[in-house]
């Protein structure tokens, strides 16, 4: 999936999941969900995030390849554990740690919708993709993008604007 679809999917997942888990969605949470949704592509030096962290993206690409270890369930759990530690030590509020994790997981789901799939069970071999896939940047992704856009509007209406307290919170 492309940069914008990952960001949109991450934020669209973040709002309802965070609200349902008892963490009212916030703008900073949405920004971190977007960041989390870009994070797995740190294994590609040409990606948005990879260009900013070349000291990480180049070795990751060399040793594991693009869509390698960072696109696995094991790595997602590791990221979750690190975020849990950070929030446990009060360095990062729980709601914001959750936002990054939701974004990260959303990236793996989105990439699994493409024909290349993801190495979900790394270090075990095999790539996993959904039964129905769309090509990155193709017409199918365009359709997904607009469906997500509608989903985002509905999520904002349902989980933020209808509750004045939460809406105010989300504007901070
Ligand atoms: Zn990816």
Image (spheres, helix red, strand yellow):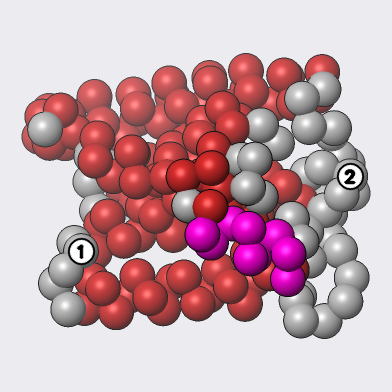
Q: Position of residue 3 (x, y in %)?
A: 59, 32
Badge 2: how crowded within 10 Å, few (<14), some, or many (20+)?
some
| Picture coordinates of residue 114, whole percent (x, y) | 82, 42
In this view, the residue in front, 156 or 50, is: 50
Mainly helix, strand or loop, the magenta region? Answer: helix
Q: Which mark is drawn over residue 92?
A: 1
Residue 4, quarter of the rendered image: top right
Q: Secondary structure at mark 1?
A: loop
As drawn, 165 above or below 20 = above
Q: Residue at x 44, y 71 (%)?
A: 80
* Image spot of residue 97 (x, y percent): 31, 61
- Provide the residue span drawn in magenta: 55-63
Which of marks 2 and 1 precedes in the sequence?
Answer: 1
The residue depicted at 58 percent of the width and 73 percent of the height is: 75
Q: Is residue 60 magenta?
A: yes
**Quadrant of res 74:** bottom right
Q: Quadrant of residue 6?
A: top right
Name the residue tied to disc 2: 115
18 falls in the magenta region: no
Q: Is residue 71 visible?
A: no
């Amino acid at each position: 999936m492309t940069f914008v679809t990952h960001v949109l999917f991450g934020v669209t997942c973040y709002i309802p999941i965070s609200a349902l888990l008892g963490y009212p969605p916030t703008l900073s949470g949405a920004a971190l969900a977007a960041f989390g949704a870009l994070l797995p592509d740190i294994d590609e030096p040409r990606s948005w995030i990879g260009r900013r962290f070349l000291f990480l993206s180049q070795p990751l690409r060399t040793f594991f390849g693009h869509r390698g270890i960072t696109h696995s369930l094991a790595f997602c759990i590791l990221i979750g554990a690190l975020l849990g530690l950070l929030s446990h030590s009060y360095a990062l509020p729980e709601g914001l740690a959750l936002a990054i994790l939701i974004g990260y997981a959303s990236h793996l789901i989105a990439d699994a919708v493409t024909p290349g799939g993801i190495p979900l069970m790394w270090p075990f071999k095999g790539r996993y993709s959904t039964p129905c896939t769309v090509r990155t940047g193709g017409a199918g992704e365009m359709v997904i993008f607009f469906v997500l856009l509608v989903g985002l509007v509905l999520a904002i209406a349902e989980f933020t604007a209808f509750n004045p307290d939460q809406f105010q919170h989300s504007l901070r």
